[in-house]
Image (spheres, coloured by chain):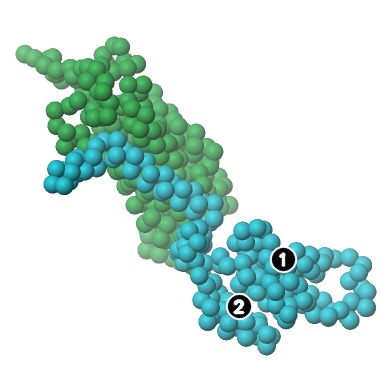
Chain colours: A cyan, B green
Amino acid sequence: MADALPALDRNWRSPAVIRLAGLGVTALYAVFIVWVYAAQPRSLREMRGGVAASIGAYRIDAAAFDEGLRYFRTDRFAEARRAFARADPAQRDPRTQYYVAYAFLREGWGRVYADDALYRQAQIALQRALAASPDGVVRVDDPDLALKSSDEMAETLARGLRRDVSDLNPLAMLEKRP
Amino acid sequence: MTADPRRDAGAVWHEAFTLPLVLLSAALLGGLRIDAAGGLAFVPPTLFALVLAVMLIAVLHRCGALDPARLVHPRRTGLANASGVVIVVALGAAAAQMIAALTPEEGLLALVFDVAWLVLIGNTLAARPDRSRLLSSLLVMFGSAFVVKFILLGALYAPDASLTKRVVMALVEGVSLGALAYQPPGPATGYVIFAAGLLFLAGIAALPHGRHPGPADATDPRAGEHAAEWPQVPAHDGVLRRRGPGRPVDRPLVHAPPPS
């Protein structure tokens, strides 16, 4: 046992082991750099969240999410978005980002016209939700929502932003709120 | 094998950890832009910056600041060659990012900076100074670019009238900026690029160079043969010489006065 320890120490100092460890550390660092340039985190908080999400360690703040959901269901959309932002600071959770997009959609929806600026922000949030989703689609099983998948919401947003003769159809005023 | 295993291990450590991490850090920080609101953006290098980086590596090689045979060589082990390739790639990435970081992003000023880089690096390539002069020259080149972009242009185009802006405007009295568009980077970016520049220049200064091969790799059974390929040449004649692969003829590096 006493002889084995110096031998182990010598092995750890051998050039091959040092080089192998160096290559491993450098490869990890290089992957991190490539990820940073590809993901373009806009803050240190997003960067931390992104790293945590990439190793499966990212968790949203459930209490803040529930609070956001309560605001969302009482049509207090600005407050809901603030709570969702607190719940998902790195914007890496598809479900939370879907609700953020939904908050923009409902706030921007009107019987006579849709608010283009809010709809565009909904599209951006929906893109974040899709980017964070592993299979490229988000499905939320919530009875309070009329649009239960990202595909439905994307189409509703595109229709709201489109300018054509169907905008003049008076029956559109009878449509249900999404 | 060389005589001092501790020194060998240190040099292997330097090649496997220090150089790649320093150069990759310079590459990472070189692309970081921080706006006034604290938002981050990571900007990849332009194509022209990549071309200039390749030219810069050629300059380092021709001036003796980088000896590629010490990083990649058939007589080195596979792991040692892999370490060498990583260093060269990291050096290229860091050089491209540093050049891009010290160049305005767009507009006429970007063109002026690009032409200046091309002329300066091309001139250095042609002049072929020795290593120490090259390092001094690079310090001046990168330092000047930093001062012009982050201090002079940053002050001139700053939204508020800082003391530097007033001093610069007083010095160039009567000169109008006209339609010379420039978007100054956030103040924090300058500090980050300064740190990245220091890392990059330190990495260049620490690149394998010199007159004898790097320490032998204990895993390379032919290390002794390797060492014999780059014999040390005594400087008793007052002329420092370098030998190595691709250098069949000795080239004087530093001329000392002839012995009386």
Q: Secondary structure at mark 1?
A: helix
Q: Quadrant of residue B204?
A: top left
| Marks 2 and 1 close (CB-CB < 8 Å) | no
N-terminal of the pair, mark 2 or mark 1, is: 2
The reply, left or right, for residue A170 in relation to residue A124 is right
Q: Is residue A48 visible?
A: yes
Within-10-Å neighbours for mark 2: few <14, some 14–19, many 20+? many
Q: Dot 1 corresponds to which residue?
A: A150
| Chain where mark 1 sits | A
Question: Residue B168: x and y, percent?
Answer: 40, 55
- Depth check, front residue: A113 or B36: A113
- Depth check, front residue: B176 or B91: B91
The residue at the far top in this view is B249
The reply, left or right, for residue A30 in relation to residue A150 is left
- On the same chain, marks 2 and 1? The answer is yes
Image point (73%, 81%), residue name: A144
Image point (92%, 73%), residue name: A168
Question: Residue B45: x and y, percent?
Answer: 50, 44
Q: Amino acid at mark 1?
A: Ser
Q: Dot 2 corresponds to which residue?
A: A81
Question: Residue A100: x and y, percent?
Answer: 64, 73
Quadrant of the rendering where the C terminus of chain A is positioned = bottom right
- Which numbered dot is residue B41? none
The residue at the far front in this view is A1
Q: Is residue A131 visible?
A: no
The reply, left or right, for residue A68 in relation to residue A139 is left
Within-10-Å neighbours for mark 1: few <14, some 14–19, many 20+? many
* Cα–Cα span, label 2 and label 1: 18 Å
Question: Residue B82: x and y, percent?
Answer: 38, 33
Image point (11%, 16%), residue name: B236
Q: Amino acid at mark 2?
A: Arg
